[in-house]
Image (spheres, rainbow, N blue to C red):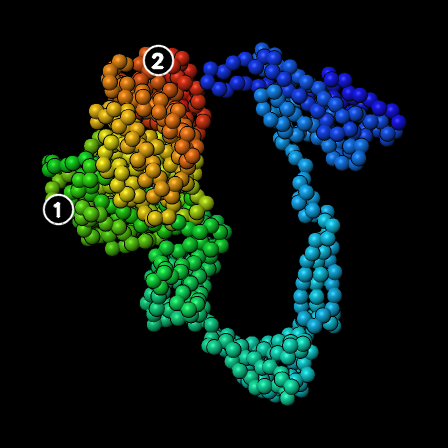
Amino acid sequence: MTSTIVPPVDLAPGMPSRVVTISATDVTEGGTSLEGQMVRFALSDTLDVTSGGDVIAKTQAEVVLDSNGEGRIRLPVYDEDVKTWCGKDWAILVTASWGSQKAIRVPAGTSAIALSALPNIRPLRGREVQWALTGAGITVVEGSQWGATVSLDGGVLQFVLTVPPGGTAWYKGALGSSADLDTLADGAYVVVNGDVAEAIGLPESLNGVVESYEWVGLQRYHVKTTGEQRTWQRSRFSDGWASWERVDGNSWFKGNLDEQDATTLAGLGPGLYLVRYVGTAEAFGLPQRLIGQLEVVDAGTQRRITFAPNDSGSGFGAKAVWEVATNSEGNLRDRWQRSDKHIMRSAPVVLTAPAGEYGPVAVSREAVRLPFTVPTNVSRVRVHMRPWNYRTEIEWGPARLEGVMIAQAAQNGLGTITGSRWYAPNAAGATVPGAGWTSEWFHVGLTPGSTFLLSYGAEWLDASRDLVSGKCWAHADRAKYDTTEEAVYGNGWGGFTLQPMDIWIECEAPSNVPINMYIGASNNVFAGTSSVFMSYPTQHARRNGAFCALTAAGGWSIMDASMHKADIINRFGYPTRIADRIYLDMGSNIEARGATAQEAIAEMERWMNTRLNALGNPPVHLLTQISRWTSDSTGDSYGTLSDWNQWIRYEATKRPEVVALHDQAAMFADPEKPWTARVELRESPTDVHFSEMGQKLRAQALDGEITLPMLTAKNPSEIGGVTYVGDGVYEIN
């Protein structure tokens, strides 16, 4: 045997090898050069590498990084046939002079590979080795009845199956009129007609199936008549067979749902029902307008109802199974859950920005259409409407509804409807008071990738109400909500932002579809000519396949009392966790309140300590704030917001629930006035709000697609994701 000591410049003599590159960066504040720092590589043990018994002794090599924090080394490619001198697996141990140790394996190949591309590996721990599976076996033995065991012996999983003796199939064929039930062998037998059943002494003269379990002295007789399933049973004792008795209690199949006396699900008795018509499914409040089977199970005071549609419907994926159960008071809940996949939960879709105070005007816009999208198939919704402003808590109204309808938009962003229409039941004629109105649950067919419109018509009973320029679609005739008329000014339609009704849709959706909650002020909702629909929260939610739970209002501030009220922040629904993540953009109006940074910070801390807990304590993303363009770099207002941003960057991010900081104040700062946004990204040179292009860039920034500060960018084309196309026009990539 010969031995080879690996020289420090090379850890791979006599073995396939590969160059590994190292690139390190100091990411701390004011990062410094890593020149002279070292990365040490060492074999985990001595290796046997040749059939002749040559050995590579355990050794190590060090790479000294250059001024760019870079270095190179040649390392042996991992081969599972190569073992250590004592027969164990091996790895290469990597230790950086500034960090801890990890173990790697270099995959086969000839090109250079980055050290950062090699994932950590680790040896199995003692308990893992003990329970690691290396094989499996199965043994079949005879016994008096069926049984199975499993054990783990030295890494081999051993299955032992116990089967009754005989080795023949369970099905034994048809019984004749001369068969003796008392001496039947184990198995299942068919009774082909009532004459045979009567001749051999079965309890009913009907065709069916007899199951005989000789080893436990039990027989069952299953029959079906007039749609009913019945089961009879008898047992064998020391003095012979007992008489037959019904063991199913009564027929589990109760017939067709539309033929029952009960008019609600709560009135149905236990059993199995057939849903033959979609109208029946809708009348009983089933989660999908489909035919299928309905099963009612009572366990003590608890009741569970399961609906299994025969067809899940066009575009709605695999066949669904739904369940609804009683609550702690014994009453059926009002929401179904998908039991075959993810449970269902309530998910909000925000449609409006809340209006301000409105007085009588000459022309009232009383028919309104609002565009929205959903990230998943939605088959059941209800609509919430309230004439109020949740920032000021001012109510007005009431309004009498002409009706409420959902339909697909013929063109993205326009108010023309097409295709199917879904009407909220009992909406026509309903009065919407200042305290609000909620529709009943109703069935829809919403699919991702399409834009839908919520349409409603309303006659205001207190006064005519004006609308503010923006982008929902409104008409002076409240009855026009139900027309397919093209939404253009020439047809009496106009584009508007704010309108008297605060509206959101509540959807039933699988729990694996995320809900993003965005809380902020006017810059969260105003987006040029397509407010709300093209604001950065709704754009960001759409591009991430999430529901958008948007609570934002013009002029809202962390200093406002309404910001801390549970019935406003939690207005989307239930005490359970509503949001999977929350984006806080809450500082833009601090200066308008004349507050100091310390006062605003105290209010933010109070909000996070109370409201986050009420929302289920979801992970938090924080955004820094951009000041108004009129602010002065030396004025108190700018100084307040600057101090706020510094607190967000360096103190608020230390909280355990905060998972990310989005420093948009730095990303989109104007080179000349860095306390405000670039003029090209604002709706106008004198407007603090972002344009649609600016809002799209903000949505991209939340996903990390725009990360560098903008102070050095002299025009928008230098911003990541923006291209200049000529004539003063910029496009987003």
548 or 316, which lies in front? 548
Against 149, residue 69 (above or below) is above
Residue 297 appears in the picture as rendered = yes
Residue 681 in the figure: left or right of residue 147: left
Query: In this rendering, which labeled residue sits more in front, label 2 or label 1?
Result: 2
For the residue carrying disc 1, how many other residues have a C-alpha within 10 Å: few (<14), some (14-19), or many (20+)? few
Residue 525 lies in quadrant: top left
For the residue carrying disc 2, how many other residues have a C-alpha within 10 Å: few (<14), some (14-19), or many (20+)? some
Q: Residue at x 20, y 40 (%)?
A: 393
* Amino acid bearing label 2: Pro
Residue 69 lies in quadrant: top right
Against 565, residue 697 (above or below) is above
733 or 712, which lies in front? 712
Q: Residue at x 46, y 77 (%)?
A: 250
Against 313, residue 304 (above or below) is below
Q: Residue at x 41, y 29 (%)?
A: 654
* Amino acid bearing label 1: Leu
> Mark 1 = which residue?
461
678 or 32, which lies in front? 32
Mark toward the start of the polypeptide (2 vs 1): 1
Q: Residue at x 39, y 17 (%)?
A: 710
Disc ID at residue 671: 2
For label 2, the SS is: loop
- Counting labels gives 2
